[in-house]
Image (cartoon, grey):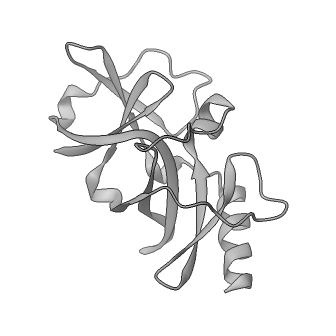
């Protein structure tokens, strides 16, 4: 299975490429007044608004570094039965894909208290790689706020 790798700080994370629509260069977002923590705004993608979540801000409490390898990972986020909406994820060092057997990913042993979007881990010669469950990035409340606000502005 193919995964898109990125970093949060010095740690490595992956997303299933089946969830990824496109990887874009970083685009300065339009601010969404009153947006919750982790939400840095929205971008215009092919004529429509796409909310933007900074994964470093969400996970580490600091914005992603403004470097060339910081990208927007555009995913199709499930919002209802069979329905998806675009969601942009800002992440650092989005520069490679890796092929791994899904069976390589095992529980980290530290699930208690971890955010729901952090999945199992795999290891390689460099260290651990943690799977990010894109569908669990937003709480139901945040999902409703983001997509309702964007629907109202469209």
Which percent across, then down, holds residue 101? 14, 35
Q: Quadrant of the N terminus?
A: top left
Which percent across, then down, holds residue 77? 47, 63
Left or right of 19? Residue 57 is: right
- Seen in the picture, residue 95 relative to 148 is either above or below; the reply is above
Report the front residue among 9 and 67: 67
Left or right of 109? Residue 43 is: right
Give the quadrant of residue 21: bottom left
Q: Quadrant of the C terminus?
A: bottom right
Left or right of 18? Residue 154 is: right
Residue drawn 69% across the image and 32% down it: 61
Residue drawn 68% across the image and 76% down it: 150
Which percent across, then down, holds residue 59? 60, 33
Report the front residue among 54 and 36: 54
Residue drawn 52% across the image and 63% down it: 87
Give the quadrant of residue 49: bottom right
Which percent across, then down, holds residue 56? 58, 36
Report the front residue among 150 and 122: 150
Residue at far right of view: 34
Total numbered labels placed on residues in the image: 0
Left or right of 34? Residue 27 is: left
Residue drawn 43% across the image and 44% down it: 68
């Amino acid at each position: 299975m193919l995964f898109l790798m990125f970093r949060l700080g010095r740690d490595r994370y992956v997303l299933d490429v089946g969830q990824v629509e496109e990887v874009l260069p970083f685009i300065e977002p339009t601010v969404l007044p009153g947006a919750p923590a982790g939400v840095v705004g929205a971008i215009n993608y092919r004529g429509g608004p796409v909310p933007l979540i900074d994964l470093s801000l969400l996970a580490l409490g600091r914005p992603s570094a403004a470097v060339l390898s910081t990208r927007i990972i555009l995913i199709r986020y499930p919002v209802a039965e069979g329905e998806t909406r675009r969601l942009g994820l800002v992440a650092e060092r989005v520069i490679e894909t890796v092929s791994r057997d899904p069976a390589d990913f095992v529980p980290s042993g530290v699930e208690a208290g971890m955010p729901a979007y952090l999945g199992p881990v795999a290891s390689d010669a460099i260290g651990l790689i943690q799977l990010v469950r894109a569908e669990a990035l937003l709480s139901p409340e945040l999902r409703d706020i983001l997509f309702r606000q964007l629907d109202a502005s469209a």
